[in-house]
Image (tube, coloured by chain):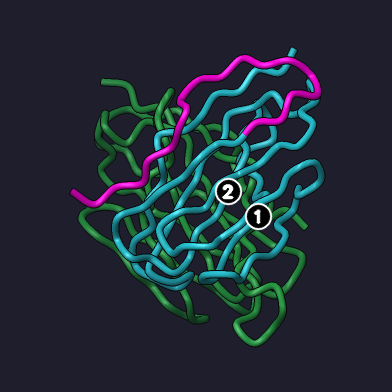
Chain colours: A cyan, B green
């Protein structure tokens, strides 16, 4: 089954404790992207990757890091989380950016205390 | 620059039609449309890549007016299952450095009542 998986689905952490949210897709997609969703602000892109070893900033990259060492994986790293990073995070992938179908992961709800 | 969606919310009875607009102050190169139901991930509806393009499946279609920097999503003969929040996303220039960047509108809440 074609899917994008994210782990963990829920996470409560404290300010400053490094964490990683994993994202994996099984469709051999080139394009992957991370978004955060906050009430009233809609979806905002954090980082995207056009292919392996090719990543670039979206609209809200501050406080986040990503890497794309393998095609299937695109982890999101919060080196020193702060309460303003409390949000719902989605990973997404598509064959390429202009592809006819894009897939979202189920989301990761993060609470930073 | 975030695209602007209008209206912010719309309430329909089953069978009624709706139009959701997505406007940008910058040139539009591609427009993506998504629907998100409460508590779920967004679901991709369609992508428009060329000015003048119209696309659709079943009773949901969209148009892309490159000159007006606007896209519209048309929902005809609405069903209860159409309820949710609709987002448009605008992509960068294929020949530019921000091609992979997607910027979303704030969303339009669509509610369909029996």
As drawn, A54 above or below A93: below
Residue shown at the point (62%, 51%) measured from the top left = B104
User: Which of the pair A59/A28 is nearer the observer?
Assistant: A28
Indicate which disc, 2 or 1, sits on the residue closer to the N terminus. 2
Left or right, B34 with reference to B15: right
As drawn, A13 above or below B59: above
* Residue B11, image x, y percentages: 45, 28
Question: Which SS class for mark 2?
Answer: strand
Which quarter shows the C terminus of chain B? top left
Q: Which mark is residue A34?
A: 2
As for residue A6 lying within the magenta part, the answer is yes
As for residue B112 lying within the magenta part, the answer is no
As drawn, A5 above or below B99: above
Instruction: Say which quarter of the image contains residue B58.
Output: bottom left
As drawn, B33 above or below B52: above
Residue shown at the point (50%, 45%) measured from the top left = A91
Question: Which SS class for mark 1?
Answer: strand
* Residue B92, image x, y percentages: 65, 72
Instruction: Bin the neighbour count of mark 1 within 10 Å (Cα to Cα): few under 14, some 14-19, many 20 and up.
Output: many
Residue shown at the point (36%, 46%) measured from the top left = A4
Given the image, what chain letter belongs to the residue carrying mark 2?
A: A
Q: Which mark is residue A94?
A: none
Q: In this rendering, do the residues under marks 2 and 1 share a single chain?
A: yes
Q: Which residue is mark 1?
A: A47
* Residue A28, image x, y percentages: 33, 65
Residue range of the region highlighted in magenta in the rendering? A1-19
User: Which of the pair A16/A85 is nearer the observer?
Assistant: A16
For the residues labelled 2 and 1, say whether their Cβ atoms are less than 8 Å apart.
yes
């Amino acid at each position: 089954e074609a899917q994008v998986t994210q782990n963990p689905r829920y996470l409560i952490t404290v300010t400053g404790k490094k964490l990683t949210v994993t994202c994996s897709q099984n469709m051999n997609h080139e394009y992957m992207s991370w978004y955060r969703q906050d009430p009233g602000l809609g979806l905002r892109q954090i980082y995207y990757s056009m292919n392996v070893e090719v990543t670039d900033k979206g609209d809200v990259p501050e406080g986040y890091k990503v890497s794309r060492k393998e095609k299937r994986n695109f982890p999101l790293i919060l080196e020193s989380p702060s309460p303003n990073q409390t949000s719902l995070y989605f990973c997404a992938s598509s064959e390429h950016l202009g592809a006819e179908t894009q897939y979202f992961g189920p989301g990761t709800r993060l609470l930073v205390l | 620059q975030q695209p602007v969606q209008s209206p912010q919310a719309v309430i329909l009875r089953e069978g009624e039609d709706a139009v959701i607009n997505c406007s940008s102050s910058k040139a539009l190169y591609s427009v993506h449309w998504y629907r998100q139901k409460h508590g779920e991930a967004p679901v991709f509806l369609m992508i428009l890549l060329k000015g003048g393009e119209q696309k659709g499946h079943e009773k949901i279609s969209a148009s892309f007016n490159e000159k007006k920097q606007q896209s519209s999503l048309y929902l005809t003969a609405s069903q209860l299952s159409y309820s949710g929040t609709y987002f448009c996303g605008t992509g960068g220039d294929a020949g530019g450095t921000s091609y992979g960047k997607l910027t979303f509108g704030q969303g339009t809440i669509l509610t369909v009542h029996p």
